[in-house]
Image (cartoon, rainbow, N blue to C red):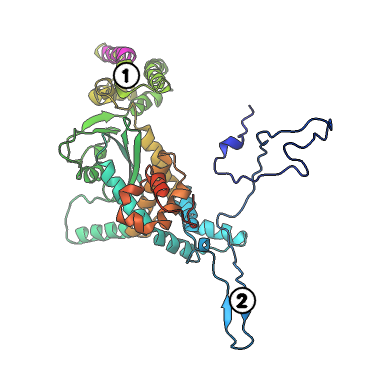
Amino acid sequence: GHGKKGAKDYPDAKRVRVALEGLAPGDKCPACETSPVYGLKPAEVLRIFGQPPLVAVVLELARVRCSGCQEVITAKLPAEAGTDRYHPSAKSMIALLNYAAGQPFNRSQVLQGWLGVPAPRSTQIDQVESALGAVHPVYEALKRRAAELPLFGHDDTKARVRELSSEIAREAEEASSAGKKRELRTGVQTTGVVAKDEAIGRTIRLFFTGRKHAGENLGSLLSSRAPELAPPIKMADALGANGSGVGRETQNAACMDHARRKFKEIEAVFPQEAAHAIAELALVYKADNEAKEQGLSPEARLAHHQRNSAPVLDRLRFWLQAKIEAREIEPNSALGAAAKYFENHWEKLTLFLRTPGVPLSNAECERLLKTAVVRRKNSLFYMTEFGAAMGDAFMSVIQTAVACGANPFKYLTELQLNQALVKAAPERWLAWNCELQLAAADPSPTSAV
């Protein structure tokens, strides 16, 4: 009751059975010395220990030499030791620290050096790259599977790739020397995509880094979508880059958070008007939270919003229009811009009132992009396009595992331990299928689960 987590909150904790010395069920009670004792459920005491992210183990193999033939006989390595110096679990930890926690390889090098288990930056990069063979097939399978889902949220954040920066500078110099006056695409970004199907409880999270913007990356993803499938729902903010380049028919929704933010930003200048708009939108968010708490189906959620949110939004729209017509709002003011945004994107903002399964905002995708933002702020940049593509693959596989409730450390390790099977049929090793594959396989002493 004081914010402390109990033993049940640590499902992967190592459990050690502590026996009662000199006392077993059936023995006489040492307190009353008359009645026998019987077994109870063990009392649980939680203890948390620290250790380096990478732990080194030196296996001392026993050796003997024949006094006659001088043959040296050495003990065999146990199967769980593996064949490489860096176990798959070590590669998984390196990848998680960098691509999930945003810790640069050079910081891990310093930390591991302090803790007596050296792990040079270059070695860490080599080990992560060696694990890519087990991760990349799953990344490609996730993209194919995501293209089939009915709902997409997508957005961009800035990225830095040294190789692409050099390429952009070279293109600009060539255009200048040729006297060409044309617009060059100078931006490099990471696109985050969240593909969902609430009916089956499926969520896939993907990253794409390069010179393409969110609309183009989503278009590439949807290029493999079966033509007989219904047009998917596309959730994003109203930025043009999120809509252009898709190349497929979609049902376009706009993020309500961005409409609300327009009013939030002008509270200091227009306190009464902003407060009224925010209070009205709060009722819409309240209805959405009620739908989530009640676990309503997409169809029931739609009906709930039609009853509770539609009148509120109609009332807010009429209020803004009346203010403009009465010239109480200057069109060129910040308040006028907020009202214009709300009106211009009305159809997209209110798609959730007409179509089942449309979310209220793109918040999930924007939270996902924080993974890329944290890594960018800590590591600053990728050196090459290959490095960026490797980061996209690891971040996508890790974040999809997290979305499925899987342990990403164990999952990455299992992909490596079963790399041949993963390459042969990556769809069977997606995060929601992995446990089924492990259960069907023969028990392995090298299994991480």
**Coordinates of residue 22 in the picture (x, y in percent):** 78, 44
Viewer-closest of 157 and 425: 425
Q: Which residue carries the number 1 mark?
A: 300
Instruction: Assess disc 2: are there few (<14), some (14-19) or many (≥20) residues with their C-alpha within 10 Å of its C-alpha.
Output: few
Q: Which residue is at a point 19% across and 33% down the rendered structure image?
A: 231
Q: Which residue is at a point 66% across and 37% down the rendered structure image?
A: 44
Q: Which residue carries the number 2 mark?
A: 63
Q: Is residue 62 magenta?
A: no
The secondary structure making up most of the magenta span is helix
Q: Secondary structure at mark 1?
A: helix
Q: Secondary structure at mark 2?
A: strand
Residues under labels 2 and 1: Cα distance? 71 Å
Viewer-closest of 347 and 250: 250
Residue segment shown in magenta: 306-322
Q: Quadrant of the N terminus?
A: top right
**Coordinates of residue 330 in the picture (x, y in percent):** 29, 19
Q: Is residue 20 visible?
A: yes
**Coordinates of residue 285 in the picture (x, y in percent):** 39, 21
Q: How many numbered marks does the figure carry? A: 2
Q: Amino acid at mark 2?
A: Arg
Q: Amino acid at mark 1?
A: Ala
